[in-house]
Amino acid sequence: MRKKIVAGNWKMNNAKVESKTLVKDIKESVKGLELKNTRVVIAPTFVFLQRTAKKVKKSAIEVAAQNMHQAESGAFTGEISAGMLKSIGVNLVILGHSERREYFGETDELLVQKVDTALKHELEIIFCFGEVLEDRKSNNHFNIVENQIKKALFHLNSEDWKHIVLAYEPVWAIGTGETATPEQAQEMHAFVRELVAERYLSDVAEEVSILYGGSVKPANAQEIFSKEDVDGGLIGGAALKAEDFVQIIKAI
């Protein structure tokens, strides 16, 4: 049975005090929940990764990095390597996020390198993909998603997929005023699962968790998570408030 996952991406938010308080509040709230088949992940900024990893070490919460560099080491000022993440107890990394693609020019070719480096270091990957509003309106969204997944992940073998979590981000539904329906989420998730099944054994497709990252909030989480192929969420703004984040966890 594939895992349910609620992952909070804090992005470039929260200084020291805010981060410490948020971790404490989430940790205390999660303590009383039954999380038999559900994973809870938080992704703070790099400067608080080690501190956060220590704080949640004996809890049900896992910590993910928001990004990493594809090289092992070298003259890459400001970058963080996979080996560095592993050395501080971080075992998950978010790759391919829409903001990394848009603002930092990350290409599918670059993501292949990042994926390979992460797997080499036994990091689990939350791999993001999704279309912008123009692609959705031109009915090109399935092609965009198919190309993103095939180019970055379809060189992997079946065993590698045990370390892959997929996260669909309908970029057009994030901060645009447009709204993605639970049915649209299910449609894309089912499409992606079938895509994986066509390339690999159906067992691989059935085991991979596919998260939804389109402005999930306490008010819509339960309806979205009720869809057959939606295995959880990659949460942005709502992950910055412990009460909201915990409500989303409860919804799954």
Image (cartoon, grey):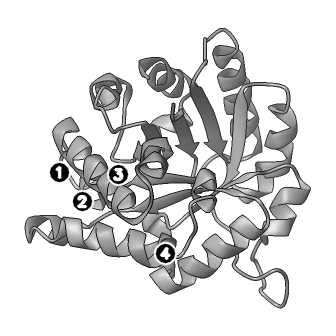
Looking at the picture, which amino acid does disc 4 mark?
A: Ala
Looking at the picture, which amino acid does disc 3 mark?
A: Arg
Q: Residues within 10 Å of mark 1 (few under 14, many from 20)?
A: few
What residue is shown with label 2?
A: 172
What residue is shown with label 1?
A: 178
In this view, the mark in front (2 or 3): 3
In this view, the mark in front (4 or 2): 4
Classify residue 61 by image quadrant: top right
Residue 34 in picture, x, y percent from top left: 61, 12
Q: Earlier in the sequence, mark 3 or mark 4?
A: 4
Q: Which mark is residue 5?
A: none
Q: Residue at x 58, y 67 (%)?
A: 157
Q: Which mark is residue 152?
A: 4
In this view, the mark in front (1 or 3): 3
Q: Earlier in the sequence, mark 2 or mark 3?
A: 2
* Res 102 seen here: no
Looking at the picture, which amino acid does disc 1 mark?
A: Glu
Looking at the picture, which amino acid does disc 2 mark?
A: Trp
Q: Earlier in the sequence, mark 1 or mark 3?
A: 1
SS category of the residue bearing label 1: loop
What residue is shown with label 3?
A: 193
Classify residue 229 by image quadrant: top left
